[in-house]
Image (cartoon, rainbow, N blue to C red):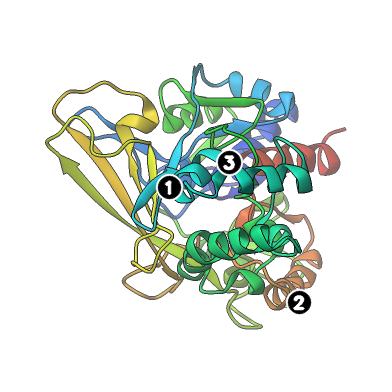
Amino acid sequence: MISKPSFIVVGCGYAGAVMARQIAEQLNKDVLIIDKRGHIAGNMYDYTNSYGIPVHKYGPHISVMDQDKTYHYLSRFTEWIPYRHRVNAVICGKEVPLPINFTSIDLLFPKKADSLKKSLIRSYGENANIPIMTLKKNTDPDIRELSDFIFENVFLHYTEKMWGLTPEEIDPGVTARIPIRLSYNDDHFLHKYQVMPKDGFTKLFENLLDHPNITVQLSTNSLDLLSLSEDKQNVIYNGAVFKGTVVYTGALDEFFNYTFGELPYRSLEFEFEDHKKDYIQNTPVLNWPDTRRATRRTEMKRLVQKSIPDHTTTITEYPGAYSRSGEHFNQPLYPIANDACFELHQRYKKLADRIDNFYYLGRLADYKYYNMEATILRALSFFEEHFAG
């Protein structure tokens, strides 16, 4: 461990790792990364199991990007494999593409499909992507009937399981991530770049962190090393006021010892299963937007495009409320997007903003439901804004 680092970065996911690389490379400063987990890469961590199948420990991850900046930045640290993501959902006993598209409508409403598709195109135009809450406001009776069906059978139960809230109680940006698509395009994503790292995400992070100015310390709770001075304006490290800079990507309520109460998060538990079969599902991910506990199952061979005969591995996800001291659901994964949570987070931000040379960013610290690209772009722009000359 570096005794007097110039920078301390807390968290070794994308936000922390990108910030550490930028500091080490662009500023030529030494950086200590601290992470409480025993591995790098945060939730992106993957490994190869005994059958030779790469497994994403914290659920499926795909590199989908719209910005050249993100793609070219990550391309320094990995080669890519082209990948087009497909997701099916079991709805009323039928397996249909998700997002709901014209193929889904054909399968679910064989007698009314043609008139429904014509009504949708008349209202919104071809190839449009319509959020469910927008569709529900349509006055056409056939479209209202369709929207009510989709709301009940695709969004309602899934959202209640995943978030512990109804679709109306959560930020509209969350439900808008899965629109209704007015085309036969079965791609789950429409991003410019859709790829998988050739050697996996962990290897990408190893390359990202491979710099002489970066030291990584795992299996370490940052709060065992860092604390606040009595006036709450300085970070204490190794018993003295830290003269360097802290970049924090963890949860702010934890850093401030839950002064105003806990910020709520959603968490997941994962069931890993090995099957003595070539494949067990038609798409990499199969969603269950019904009342069963599980939300989805990922078949890793399909996701990472590995051809390994006679064995396949799946990950089934079960959501629940985060419990920091519980045996289950003890990883804070998803900030809950509603006004009450945002207001509580703002109180913690005001405390953080008082601390000298203390910066925070990332999904947990910002309390925002960032995707991978948003996290990386946030880190790159944050570095430019606060540290670049």
- Three-letter amino acid code of the residue under disc 2: Asp
| Labels 1, 3: front one | 3
- Answer few, some or many: residues within 10 Å of disc 1's Cα (few below 14, many 20 plus, some between 14 and 19): some
Tags 1 and 3 in contact by the CB under 8 Å rule? no
Do we see residue 98 in this rendering? no
Secondary element under disc 2, as helix, strand or loop, is loop
- Circle 3 SS class: helix
Residue 14 badge: 3
Q: Earlier in the sequence, mark 2 or mark 1?
A: 1
The residue under label 2 is 231
Question: Residue 121: which quarter of the image?
Answer: top right
C-alpha distance separating marks 2 and 1: 29 Å
Determine crowd level at label 3: few under 14, some 14-19, many 20+ residues with C-alpha closer than 10 A: many
Q: Which residue is mark 1?
A: 218
Question: Upstream in the sequence, badge 1 or badge 3?
Answer: 3
The numbered mark at residue 381 is none
- Going by the numbered disc 3, the residue's amino acid type is Tyr
Q: Position of residue 258 (x, y in %)?
A: 59, 79
